[in-house]
Amino acid sequence: MGRRGPKSEPTPLKLLKGTRPDRVPTEEPVPEEGPLELDAGPRAVSDEVQAVWDKTVAQLEGMGLGAPPDAEVLRAYCEAVVQHRRASAVLRSSGVLVQGLHGNYVRNPALQIQRDTANTLLILAREFGLTPSARTQLGLDRERPTGTGAERFLS
């Protein structure tokens, strides 16, 4: 049976928002502290994805968010950004309609890729507080918290 009510928020976001202490879980697993890193080797990413990764990780660090277990979801976000850019470039150069096999005009398949990646981006960006509406929910102070781990989230 499905869960009722709105989707639960991550505890760090609840703390940043100033959620009442009795509504903040106290016994949940805490991820290991450390840098978000992309592995080298067979799962290495393109230079484009790496550039998006570097920029996004810098933003997350500036907001005091992100932990090593988030790396795979963040990788999916970065790859979706690159795929969205590529699909948009195809649409700019070839247009919304392309000639089909029988000479008739059909909708460009890049439209579906663009739409799918845009949806993926929105979903994942919300998870990391990377949309304007997600940031308004954070209620961050102008002074950035310092420290590591819980100190950073409780300051």
Image (spheres, rainbow, N blue to C red):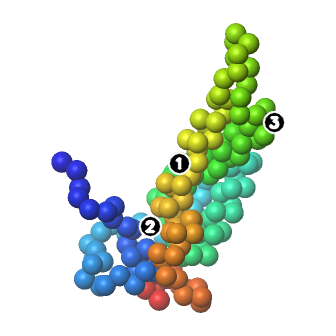
Please provide percent x and percent y for residue 95.
76, 34
The amino acid beneath tag 3 is Ser
Q: Farthest right residue?
A: 93
Q: Residue at x 40, y 84 (%)?
A: 18
Give me the C-alpha separation between circle 2 and circle 3.
45 Å
- The residue that disc 2 covers is 32
Q: Farthest front residue?
A: 104
Q: Is residue 76 left or right of residue 44?
A: left
- The residue that disc 3 covers is 93
108 lies above or below 56: above
Q: In this orientation, which residue lies closer to the viewer: 62 or 93?
A: 93
The amino acid beneath tag 1 is Thr
- The residue that disc 1 covers is 120
Q: Is residue 34 visible?
A: no
Q: Is residue 45 left or right of residue 21?
A: right
Q: Secondary structure at mark 1?
A: helix
Please provide percent x and percent y for residue 120.
53, 48
Please provide percent x and percent y for residue 148.
51, 80
Please report whichever mark, 2 or 3, sits nearer to the chain's N-terminal start: 2
Give the tally of numbered discs. 3
Residue 43 position by quadrant: top right
The amino acid beneath tag 2 is Glu
Please report whichever mark, 1 or 3, sits nearer to the chain's N-terminal start: 3
Q: Residue at x 68, y 56 (%)?
A: 52
